[in-house]
Image: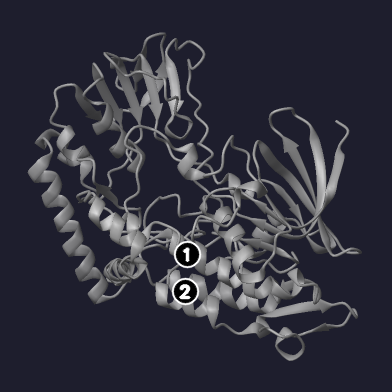
């Protein structure tokens, strides 16, 4: 299909969720930059939190700490262009720009656009894992993933099959159990279910937050410090083991004191706490297993019939609706990205043995390209939005000379990226995040953890705000490659 070209834009952001929104806000407030566009493949902005609209959808981090610390009045919405997906991007050495190929998903039209700075704000929890099963074409009911929910889908008096038992399933089931005729949940591995309780914020507190924001800031700081105290339990130390054992015992006690005894073996894991993400049971999923219309089994589904599912043991379970709570594909790394000298993102991955980025934001050989929530940015115990804002602050600092036309491009040094790669995997090796159990943290091709950030949030802040600028080199307008720290004004 013949492609058309759009006018040059200084900064192109791919993804309109929390990360893209925060990037737009910071470009405006910190750099007074208005020359940017934010593309998103969805019908509206919001990313993961627009895609996931199933009943009970929520977050297990207190809301006061799962919100951006920037205001909402920076006119970022007019920079959004929805129903657009990026297909590939090629670095143009002669012009020091990225040539990006995009697709209008509503018309199928292909177009291209050049930009100076390319930022991937593509999240990992929007593209569902593919579901393949014998007889899928025979099934006459609805098959729906939690991230593709249909708001007009009624569960009233329906036989519902739920496949999966992570956070999505544990939020969904309690919120449909009242309406469904029956719910049969198929699980593969246990989880560490932790007792938790939603605490609604009274209107008087919301009013105080609005008119006295310092109170909200203090509360955010308290929640931050409280959550940070749970970080050391994931370290492979005596203290960490003691903390994990205590948390494991709390999880076991919660299950055994709440769920029917026939399900204990299915619900209580034997692997170390933390190597899979814990499930905080705000929706009282464990208690809902006592209902007569809710059934739990690890007997795998092997095929679909017209109005039922068939399991490995030969059991037939009636099904009007099949809900897939089966997780997400790592589609944020699928788009073709070609950097300097024809180096592809796939080749970069092969070179390091897994997905890799310096301080999670940049790759050597890919000038003027940045990730927000790239490899090794995942947090297991605190707010992801804290990480988003820290990494954006780093990108803003590093890219400022390019955005202000003081340099044509910036690129991380390969030696710095290699050293960071060694440091982060050495640190991961001292935690339960290494390869102690099968989880989506682990790159299935290499067995390495590509997801987790192994250090504290204090370390994250320090490294993104007070790090060593000699890790980067800049091409300035006189075609002389020098270290920023000696030539360009950072103020």
> What is the quadrant of the C terminus in the image?
bottom right
Side of 23 relative to 461 (left or right): right
Picture quarter containing residue 257?
Answer: top left
Could you tell me how far apart the alpha carbons at marks 1 and 2 are, in whole angstroms?
8 Å
Which one is in front, 141 or 9? 9
> What is the quadrant of the N terminus in the image?
top right
Callout 1: few (<14), some (14-19), or many (20+) C-alpha neighbours within 10 Å?
Answer: many
Q: In the structure shown, which secondary structural element does the residue marked by tag 2 occupy?
A: helix
Q: Is residue 359 visible?
A: no
Callout 2: few (<14), some (14-19), or many (20+) C-alpha neighbours within 10 Å?
Answer: some
Q: Are marks 1 and 2 in contact (CB under 8 Å)?
A: yes
Residue at 33%, 66% (x, y): give it: 212
Furthest residue to the front?
Answer: 211
As displayed, is residue 106 above or below residue 303?
below
Which one is in front, 386 or 199? 199
Residue at 42%, 20% (x, y): give it: 152
Side of 481 relative to 108 (left or right): right
As displayed, is residue 103 above or below residue 449?
above
Picture coordinates of residue 124, whole percent (x, y)? 52, 48
Which one is in front, 395 or 252? 395
Sooner in the amino-acid sequence: mark 1 or mark 2 = 1
Residue at 51%, 62% (x, y): give it: 388
Residue at 69%, 28% (x, y): give it: 106
Picture coordinates of residue 176, whole percent (x, y)? 27, 26
Side of 322 relative to 244 (left or right): right
Q: Which residue is mark 1?
A: 387
Q: Which residue is mark 2?
A: 460
Picture coordinates of residue 351, whole percent (x, y)? 67, 63
């Amino acid at each position: 299909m013949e492609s058309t070209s759009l006018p040059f834009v200084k900064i192109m952001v791919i993804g309109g969720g929390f990360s893209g929104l925060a990037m737009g806000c910071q470009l405006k407030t910190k750099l007074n930059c208005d020359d940017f566009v934010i593309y998103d493949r969805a019908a509206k902005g919001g990313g993961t939190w627009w895609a996931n609209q199933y009943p009970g959808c929520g977050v297990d981090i207190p809301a006061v700490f799962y919100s951006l610390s920037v205001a909402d009045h920076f006119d970022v919405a007019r920079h959004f262009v929805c129903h657009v997906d990026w297909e590939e991007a090629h670095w143009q050495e002669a012009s020091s720009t990225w040539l990006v190929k995009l697709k209008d998903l509503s018309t199928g039209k292909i177009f291209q656009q050049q930009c100076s700075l390319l930022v991937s704000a593509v999240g990992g929890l929007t593209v569902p894992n593919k579901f393949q099963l014998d007889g899928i074409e025979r099934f006459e009911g609805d098959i729906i993933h939690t991230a593709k929910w249909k708001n007009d889908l009624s569960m009233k008096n329906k036989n519902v099959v739920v496949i999966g038992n992570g956070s999505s399933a544990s939020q969904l089931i309690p919120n449909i159990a009242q309406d469904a005729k029956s719910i049969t949940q198929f699980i593969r591995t246990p989880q560490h279910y932790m007792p938790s309780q939603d605490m609604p914020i009274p209107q008087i507190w919301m009013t105080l937050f609005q008119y006295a924001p310092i109170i909200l800031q203090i509360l955010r700081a308290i929640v931050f410090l409280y959550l940070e105290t749970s970080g050391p339990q994931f370290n492979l130390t005596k203290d960490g083991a003691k903390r994990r054992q205590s948390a494991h015992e709390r999880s076991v006690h919660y299950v055994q004191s709440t769920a029917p005894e026939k399900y204990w073996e299915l619900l209580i894991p034997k692997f170390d706490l933390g190597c899979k993400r814990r499930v905080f049971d705000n929706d009282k999923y464990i208690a809902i297993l006592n209902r007569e219309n809710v059934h739990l089994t690890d007997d795998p589904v092997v095929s679909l019939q017209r109005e039922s599912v068939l399991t490995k043991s030969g059991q037939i379970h009636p099904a009007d609706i099949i809900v897939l709570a089966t997780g997400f594909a790592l589609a944020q790394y699928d788009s073709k990205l070609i950097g300097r000298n024809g180096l592809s993102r796939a080749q970069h991955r092969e070179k390091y043995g897994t997905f890799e980025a310096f301080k999670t934001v940049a790759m050597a050989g890919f000038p003027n390209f940045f990730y927000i929530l790239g490899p090794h940015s995942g947090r297991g115990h605190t707010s992801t939005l804290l990480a988003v804002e820290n990494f954006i602050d780093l990108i803003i600092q590093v890219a400022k000379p390019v955005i202000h036309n003081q340099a044509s491009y910036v690129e991380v040094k390969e030696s710095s990226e290699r050293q960071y790669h060694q440091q982060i995997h050495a640190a991961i090796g001292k935690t339960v995040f290494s390869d102690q159990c099968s989880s989506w943290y682990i790159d299935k091709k290499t067995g390495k953890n590509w997801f987790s950030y192994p250090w504290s949030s204090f370390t994250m802040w320090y490294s993104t705000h007070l790090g060593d600028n000699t890790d980067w080199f800049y091409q300035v307008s006189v075609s002389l490659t020098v270290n920023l720290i000696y030539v360009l004004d950072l103020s």
